[in-house]
Structure formats: C-alpha cells, structure tokens
C-alpha cells in the first residue's frame, strides 16, 4: 500500500515539476464514486459549481490518509470559496492557492514565474527540503520524458491506433501515479501499442468533446460503445494535460511559467475569439461528425462558453452540436443515455 | 420610451425628497451618466472595478454593469417585470438558469434594446466569474473590441508590475477606440480627485465611529460610488455629504445595526422602513466603500495598480472577518444583518463564511438566505417580522421599552 505522502492538484496549470522537485508525489484530484454526503451541503451551497463541490468532498470526506494537502488555482471565483472552506474546515496540513494570470504576454509569464518561485519556497518550507536549480532541472527533465510519451500516445490517438477511452485511461494513469514508476508503465504501454493489431477506427463516426474537465471515463466509454470514436484534445483531463515541453536553459521558473501558460488553455484563460479559433482548428484537424459540449452544472465559465459556441455552430459551422449538462460525480442516467443515443443515431 | 431610463428619471424626481442633498447629487450623477451613454455614439461599457480614473481622464462616456442590473431589478418583481423579461431574453439564447441572474439582466438589457451597443467593452477579472464571462460574451455577441484587465489575488511587486503593465495597455486601447490622445495631466487630476474622495470617505467613517450621524436611509444609496472614482461629480457628492453631516450628532441611545453586505435595490424600501420604525443608526458604509484606496503615489499608474490590488474581495474571508470585527467593536453594534447569497461569495460569503465571520461576535445576527442577488424570494413581510422580533429581544435585553 502506498504510504508516501502526496499532494493533490485540481487544475492542469499547476506545474507538477515543483511538487516532484520537493520529493513529494503529485496526484490529480479525482472523486470517489460514493454518493454525495451532507457536509458539503452545509458548507458549500447546493447551487454551487458541482465540480468544486466534488473537490471539497474528495478533499475532506473521502480524503485518504496519505494526502498531505492540495494546491488549488485562482481558476474561478468558486475556487476562492473552496479555498476558504478548506482552510476553515478541511483540516489539511498543506493548502496553497496558486495565482494564475489570464494574460499570456511576457508580463503575465513573468508574474506567473514569480508565483511559481513562491510555491517552490512554500513547498520547500513545508517538506523541509530546498528546491534548488538542480532538483528543478531534474524534475523538468523527468516530466519532459513523460511528455515525450504523451506525444507518442497522442500521435497514436490521432492516427486511430488508440481509442478515446484508452487515451483517457493513459492520461488518468499518469496524473494519479508515482511519476517515477509510471515511466516504466508508459514504456510497456508504448511497446504494446506498437506491436498490437488495431481495430479500424477510421471508419467510425467521430465526436469531439469540449467543455468541463471529465473526471470519469463513463461518458467516453458510453459513446465509444456505439462505434464512435471520441476526441478529448480540448480537455485538461485529456490532451490538455502537461502541455508543451519545458525548456531547461536559463531561468527555469520562467520556462515553466511560459510552457504552462502557452499550452492549450481552457475557456477560463482565453478570450472568446481565441477559443472559437482553437475550436475551429480542432474541427479542421479532427473533422468530427458531431460535437458534444460537456457542461458541469453551475460552472459559470462553461455555461457562457457553451452558448457562445452554440451560436457559432448554428450560424457558421455545419456540425451537429449537443450541450450535455451534467452533475458531479458524473452519472450516466437514462435520460442522458437516451439523448446521447439519439445524437449518435442522427450523425 | 426606454423603460429603464424612464425608471431612472423617476428615481431622480423622487431623490428630491431625500434628507440629504448629497443623495440627490449622487442620483443625478448616475442619471447623467446613463443619459449621456444613451445619447452618445462612442461609448464604453464596463464591468465593476474597471479603473474609472483612466476613463475619467479620457472624458469617456461610459457606464458599468452596476448602473444597469440593480436599477432594472428595482423596476419591479414578478414574471412580467422588466428584469424577468431581460433574463428570459438571454435564456432564450440557450443560457442555463444556473447562471447568476445579475449579469443576465445586463445582457438582456442589450438584447431588449434598453442599452445601446457601445464602441467597446472593458472588463475586470476582479469581481467575479459571472461579470468576467458576461463582458466576454457581450463583446463576442455584439462584435465589439474587448479589453480585459486581469487583477491577481495576491499583492506583491510582481502583481503590481503585472497590473501596471495592463494599465498602459488599457490607455492605448481607449485612445484607439475614442480616437483621442491620452491626456496625462487630466489623468493626474482624476487621480487627485479619486484620492480626495477616498480621504473624505475615510474621514466620514472615522467621524461616524465617534458619533457623526449619516442617516442610514440616505447612505443606502451610496453603494456603487467607488466605481466612479476619479470623477469630479463623484468627489462633489462626498464633499456635500461631509458638509451636510458635519454638524449632525447621533443620539447615543439609538440602536446600531451593521448591514454586512450589499443591499439589493428591491429590498431597500423595506429596510428603510425598518430603519425609520426603530430609529436605527444604520452602519453600511464600511463594506460599501471598502474598495476606495489611496492613490497619491508619485507614479499614478503604480498607485492605481496598487489600489486595484487592495480590493477587499481578493483578500478572502479573513480580511472581511477582521473588518466586521472592527466595525462591531468600534461602532458598538447591536445587531448585524444581511443577505447571504448562496452562490455569490464576493458579495456575501455565503452561509458558511458568514458563520465564520460572526461565530465569535457576541451580537445577534439576522441572516436571510437567498438564491439570487435580487433577494426577491424573501417577502418584505418576512423581513419586517424578523426585524420586529429581533428588535424586541434586543430592547428587552438592553432594558429599554419594546
């Protein structure tokens, strides 16, 4: 059983390299599948972002004993609420709010670099280590190796040698595993993919999944059970994870900041016109038969974006578009299954 | 006739009956801003907490979302009200009902033609996700240029530099939109104006603690004034307020009520009636003017960046708790009350945070849980009944006649 302390993170803009350099394991926060419990009803109101409510439950009620704490980001106003709620009743040893700028210009990168340096300092103080340049360099090199693997798997996905759910599982595996052990596992997966016979994915209908982070494979698995292939490039729990390579020359904090801010970013970070351009690029690359916007209830950013994209899709782009509002934990209820089946049938 | 503007005109007419001239000046100021906006072509629409000093320096014709949604909300309640029609106009676009109704009303005002489409939109990430997303959506829908000023949560030198840099960009953006050069001396004047208004508001606050009487029924109207920092008319309101109240002393026997957060316009009438009925000293100004800050530094851009970073909402619940404790102690508050908007942390903190704020305070706390910022689901009768029972209990405890 894993006895090593670990830190959780909730947003793909948290550079795990820093946690790794502190000698601590990092894990993306996924929820447990137990039914909702009452305490979060008490602290966080029912009409609050369902994703954030789930995070609160995972960090309090269902927290495993090895979880030392969590790193959150200023992704939205709901996370401020989460931060305060955790500080007051989360009973956590470590809780850090990383300030992520919305601007990706040099000033934004410089600001983020300083926030990362502060995070490194705080981690060092808490875990009684010094995160020096050498440690950070090694951590970046290590994660760049993981990125190399991810690039291979993404390529396999693009060339239809991997299904959407297989790709999702690999990303999930990396984000929750010991980052040293996972390299060996990735090597094995790579060999398996290279030597395996593949089903012909090219003939299948294609669906592009946009919107809120998917913390469960259920939706992708359900869609792909209908001879459909699902692209999860837009999701931070998909191809958005870990982003682009981090340079190892010069100021490492600046390099980390630049790499993370310049990766494919979510709707929170981007202006609407940029997001529309990104979605259009994905449409051009993937050429899907349909688009599903996965919308977590009470998640403000995605509520606005789903409407904005709907207007674009109706007015300019001739691709069927479905907004799928769901709760967290994700539940494939009959009504949702029926809507999805109908959508797939009409593609 | 534009019903929104018509309603604003009615508010202006009624403001003549306010006790203080400052209240009337403030209403007139808002009225003039909206009138100019509706009559002009090159206008700018902003969210709350955009640095208005820069807009003032450009003499830009602008209004912000706080001058729209609360006023439309105050036009009436019910399924056929203007606010509901505005919301429905946006819901018809496909927006879910789970989105905060305030920005929906603002967006709906554009959909229904109550507001003309401006030349550009400027938003701030300071306030909340809803306002931030609203301004993005408005710019996209109406195909107008958008400038966003991103305000970090922590205040360090990196954050100041980051915001300062954006202020220069904002100046270029407005100059481009209005086709007008930036006038640095006017900016300095606007900054002086902003600083003086801050100083007067601080002076009034200090004097309030030692017995200066600013009638609560009047001061309710001053929320939102901080968004007009930098304007001479706004400074005139503060000057007038100070002048009018300088000789007014509060009767020490009056009970003091601290209103914790934003008072929805729809509920102002009932709250005013309670203030009058119980002759309450209504302490409301501490939080409502909390976003005013000194801007007297040598470099006005750095000063402005520091002001934007000093906002109360960014600091989280601990600073609000300290502020609330200070108010309770200094004003010798008898009762604290407020709405807790379940989703809007920035305005109220929600139930969990409010409990945290008041759990140590040895004063009664009257809380109305509401799901929307308009507070319309709480009937006026309930507010009256709650006040009646709590005031009776307080008076009994204090040994005065019920």
Image (cartoon, coloured by chain):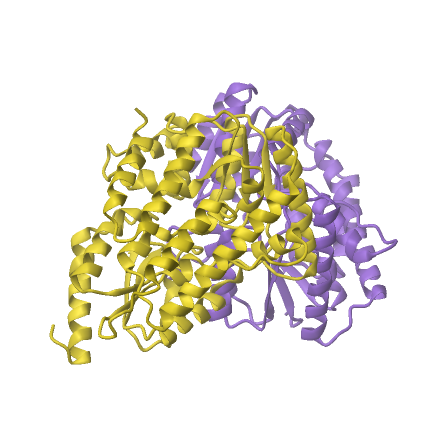
Chain colours: A purple, B yellow
Res. B361 visible in picture? yes
* Quadrant position of the N terminus of chain A in the picture: bottom right
How far across and how far down the image is residue A42, in percent? 37, 63
Residue B105's quadrant in the figure? top left
Vertical position of residue B238 compared to residue B130: above or below: below
Judge by depth and name the residue closer to the eye, A91 or B85.
B85
- Measuring 66% from the left and 45% from the top, which residue is drawn there? B166
- Measuring 26% from the left and 44% from the top, which residue is drawn there? B16
Q: Is residue A331 left or right of residue A70?
A: left
- Measuring 63% from the left and 40% from the top, which residue is drawn there? B170
Residue at the far left: name it.
B401
- Measuring 49% from the left and 36% from the top, which residue is drawn there? B62
Q: Is residue B357 left or right of residue A169?
A: left
How far across and how far down the image is residue A312, in percent? 54, 24
How far across and how far down the image is residue B147, in percent? 60, 37
Judge by depth and name the residue closer to the eye, B216 or A124.
B216
């Amino acid at each position: 059983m894993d006895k090593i302390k670990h830190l959780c993170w909730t947003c793909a803009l948290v550079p795990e390299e820093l946690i790794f350099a502190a000698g601590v394991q990092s894990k993306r926060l996924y929820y447990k599948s137990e039914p909702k419990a009452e305490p979060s009803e008490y602290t966080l109101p029912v009409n609050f972002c369902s994703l954030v409510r789930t995070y609160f439950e995972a960090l309090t009620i269902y927290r495993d004993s090895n979880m030392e704490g969590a790193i959150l980001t200023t992704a939205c106003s709901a996370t401020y609420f989460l931060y305060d709620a955790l500080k007051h009743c989360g009973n956590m040893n470590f809780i850090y709010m990383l300030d992520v700028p919305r601007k990706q210009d040099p000033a934004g990168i410089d600001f983020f670099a300083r926030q990362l340096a502060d995070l490194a300092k705080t981690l060092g103080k808490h875990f009684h280590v010094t995160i020096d340049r050498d440690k950070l360099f090694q951590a970046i090199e290590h994660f760049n190796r993981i990125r190399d693997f991810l690039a291979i798997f993404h390529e396999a996905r693009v060339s239809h040698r991997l299904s959407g759910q297989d790709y999702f599982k690999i990303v999930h595996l990396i984000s929750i595993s010991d980052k040293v052990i996972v390299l060996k596992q990735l090597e094995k997966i790579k060999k398996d993919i290279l030597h395996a016979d593949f089903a012909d994915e090219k003939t299948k209908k294609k669906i592009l999944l946009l919107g809120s982070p998917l913390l469960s494979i259920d939706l992708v698995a359900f869609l792909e059970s209908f001879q459909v292939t699902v692209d999860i490039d837009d999701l931070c729990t998909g191809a958005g994870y870990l982003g682009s390579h981090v340079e190892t020359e010069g100021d490492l904090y600046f390099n980390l900041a630049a790499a993370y801010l310049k990766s494919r970013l979510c709707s929170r970070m981007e202006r609407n016109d940029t997001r529309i351009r990104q979605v259009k690029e994905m449409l051009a690359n993937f050429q899907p038969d349909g688009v599903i916007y996965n919308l977590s209830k009470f998640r403000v950013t995605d509520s606005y974006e789903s409407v904005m994209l709907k207007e674009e899709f109706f007015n300019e782009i001739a691709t069927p578009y479905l907004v799928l509002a769901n709760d967290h934990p994700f539940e494939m209820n009959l009504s949702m299954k029926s809507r999805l089946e109908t959508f797939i049938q009409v593609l | 006739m534009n019903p929104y503007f018509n309603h604003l005109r009615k508010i202006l007419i009624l403001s003549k009956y306010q006790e203080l001239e400052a209240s009337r000046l403030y209403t007139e100021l808002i009225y003039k801003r909206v009138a100019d906006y509706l009559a002009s072509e090159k206008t700018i629409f902003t969210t709350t907490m955009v640095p208005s000093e820069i807009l003032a320096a450009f003499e830009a014709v602008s209004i912000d979302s706080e001058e729209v949604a609360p006023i439309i909300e105050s036009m009436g309640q019910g399924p056929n009200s203007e606010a509901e029609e505005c919301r429905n106009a946006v819901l018809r676009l496909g927006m879910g009902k789970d989105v905060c109704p305030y920005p929906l009303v603002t967006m709906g005002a554009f959909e229904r033609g109550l507001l003309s489409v401006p030349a550009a939109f400027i938003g701030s990430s300071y306030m909340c996700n809803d306002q931030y997303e609203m301004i993005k959506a408005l710019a996209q829908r109406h195909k107008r240029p958008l400038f966003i000023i991103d305000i970090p949560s922590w205040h360090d030198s990196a954050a100041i530099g980051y915001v300062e840099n954006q202020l220069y960009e904002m100046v270029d953006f407005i100059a481009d939109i209005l086709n007008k050069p930036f006038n640095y001396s006017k900016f300095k004047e606007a900054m002086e104006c902003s600083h003086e208004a801050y100083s007067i508001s601080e002076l009034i606050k200090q004097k309030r603690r030692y017995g200066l009487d600013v009638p609560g029924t009047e001061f309710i109207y001053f929320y939102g004034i901080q968004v007009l920092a930098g304007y001479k008319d706004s400074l005139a309101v503060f000057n007038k307020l100070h002048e009018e109240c300088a000789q007014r002393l509060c009767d020490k026997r009056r009970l003091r009520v601290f209103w914790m957060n934003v008072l929805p316009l729809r509920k102002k009438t009932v709250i005013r009636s309670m203030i009058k009925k119980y002759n309450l000293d209504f302490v409301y100004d501490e939080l409502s003017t909390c976003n005013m800050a000194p801007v007297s530094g040598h470099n006005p851009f750095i000063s402005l960046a520091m002001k934007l970073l000093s906002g109360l909402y960014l600091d989280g619940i601990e600073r609000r708790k300290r502020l609330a404790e200070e108010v309770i102690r200094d004003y010798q508050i008898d009762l604290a009350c407020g709405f807790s908007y379940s989703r809007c942390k920035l305005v109220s903190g929600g139930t969990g945070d409010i409990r945290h704020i008041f759990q140590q305070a040895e004063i009664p706390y009257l809380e109305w849980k509401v799901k929307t910022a308009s507070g319309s689901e709480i009937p006026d009768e309930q507010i009256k009944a709650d006040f009646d029972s709590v005031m009776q209990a307080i008076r009994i405890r204090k040994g005065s006649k019920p």
